[in-house]
């Protein structure tokens, strides 16, 4: 997995919808059997969060 993309709530398009941006410094976590990644938006620096599959989470570690 080269780069992780997630929705950024601060970066919006012309229709005021969140856009997919690259996540920098992703940290993979597991809690209650669910995997997720937390990081920052490469464009605006806002926080990003994304649920992941177990296979994707293992590939990121």
Image (cartoon, rainbow, N blue to C red):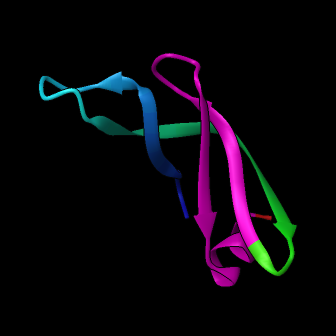
**Which of the image's four quarters has the C terminus?**
bottom right
Where is residue 58, by image quadrant? bottom right
View extreme (top): residue = 44
44 part of magenta stretch: yes
38 drawn magenta: yes
Q: Position of residue 57 (x, y in %)?
A: 71, 71
Does residue 6 sit above or below 10 in this rendering? below
Q: Can you give x and y, in whole percent of width and height, for residue 4 in the image?
A: 53, 52
Query: Residue lying farthest left?
Result: 14
Residue occupying image coordinates x 75% and y 75%:
34
| Percent position of residue 46, x then y | 58, 22
Residue at point 46%, 49% (across, down): 5
Q: In the image, what residue occupies the spot 62% across and 47% down?
A: 49
Q: Front-most of 43 and 10?
A: 10
- The boundaries of the magenta stretch are 35-60
Q: Is residue 31 above or below residue 5?
A: below
> Up-down: is 22 above or below 53?
above
Q: Locate the N terminus by quadrant.
A: bottom right
Measured as percent of width and height from the top left, residue 7 is found at 43, 43
Q: Is 44 situated left or right of 48 in this image?
A: left
Tell me: 23 left or right of 13: right
Name which residue lies at 47% across and 39% down: 22
Instruction: Give the number of marks.
Output: 0
């Amino acid at each position: 997995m080269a780069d992780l993309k997630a929705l950024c709530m601060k970066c919006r398009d012309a229709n005021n919808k969140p856009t997919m941006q690259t996540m920098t410094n992703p940290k993979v976590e597991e809690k209650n059997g669910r995997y997720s990644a937390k990081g920052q938006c490469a464009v605006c620096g806002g926080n990003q969060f994304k649920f992941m599959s177990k296979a994707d989470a293992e590939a990121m570690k």
